[in-house]
Amino acid sequence: MNFETLTERQEGAVRFVEIAAPPINLLGPELIRDLVSVIQRAEADDGTQVLVFTSADPDYFISHVDVIRVADGQAEAAKLTGEPSISMVFRHLSTSRLVTIAQIEGRVRGVGSEFVLACDMRFAARESAVFGQFEPAFGVIPGGGAAQHLTRLMGRGRALEVMLSAQDYDADLAERYGWINRALPADTIGEFVSALAHRIAGFPATGQVVVKNRVNAIALAPADEFRRDAELFVEGVGTPEVQGRIQAALKDGLQTREPEIDLAAFLTR
């Protein structure tokens, strides 16, 4: 199957999915549509046990949601879960029988961070990975599950620091805070992730499902908590104050390549 924003290859029971949505891998309706299709096809294929997500862009993994087309993205999300909610697509991924691994090189902020948080494991290139939850800089809560995941992974204080500061975090600090499993050198991360994926795929799928279900019972927030955060995000985005901030930022260069390289600085201009 040909995708507009993804390429994939199968190696045994491991499916590698590369994100390629120029210019900065925004999570727009096309990428959501393609991710939904990949998830559906992989879940329907008994020969696939592990999904590995990578990026074709060395500077951007998934930058954030396309703020101009949020409603269109919600419509594509509904094709997986029946709910017009990107948050519920991500939670579906967390509860899927598939084992999911994010190999992060480049920037992963906002809903991009929430996508990798929904994956079962996250490994980041020490030299290039940058993490951020910048939504509170516009006056809204992250709507894709960040508050749920980060609080459980980091603890209350660090989760509040990450979200309320809207700062960028490098891979080493993200590792120390619990945002990711490990920070690894760029020249070894691909080999490490591939070896791990194939090792996991070599074990019985039934055991993977049981382990995931039990870990999720302990560590994954109930679906209604994700729904509530998504509702609060949509309500906030619709207010005049937030829309004014978004439009001003778009006018200054938000969602273009160079200003987003150092988004934390851009937000305080």
Image: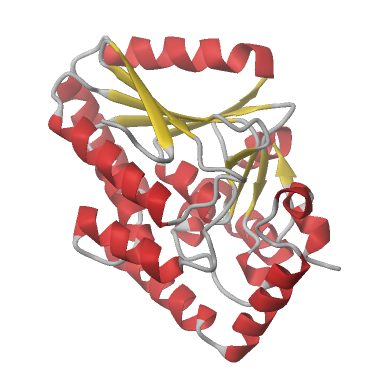
Residue 81 or 205: which is nearer the viewer? 81
Residue 180 or 143: which is nearer the viewer? 143
Q: From what the image shows, is residue 122 above or below residue 188?
A: below
Give x and y (percent) for residue 20: 50, 36
Residue 258 in the figure: left or right of residue 62: right
- In the image, what residue occupies the spot 52% across and 46% down? 153
Q: Is residue 185 visible?
A: no
Q: Quadrant of residue 44?
A: top left
Residue 224 or 241: which is nearer the viewer? 241
Give x and y (percent) for residue 37: 26, 42
Q: From what the image shows, is residue 227 above or below residue 39?
A: below
Residue 13 in the figure: left or right of residue 244: left
Give x and y (percent) for residue 68: 53, 68
- In the image, what residue occupies the spot 36% across and 32% down? 100
Q: Quadrant of residue 125?
A: top right
Q: Is residue 177 visible?
A: yes
Residue 230 or 149: which is nearer the viewer? 230
State the quadrant of the C terminus: bottom right
State the quadrant of the N terminus: top left
Q: From what the image shows, is residue 29 above or below residue 251?
A: above
In the displayed orientation, state which residue is furthest to the right. 269
- In the image, what residue occupies the spot 29% across and 37% down? 38
The number of numbered discs placed on residues in the rendered structure image is 0
Q: From what the image shows, is residue 68 above or below residue 200?
A: below
Q: How is the image coloured?
A: secondary structure
- In the image, what residue occupies the spot 51% across and 55% down? 111
Give x and y (percent) for residue 263: 75, 55
Residue 63 in the figure: left or right of residue 216: right
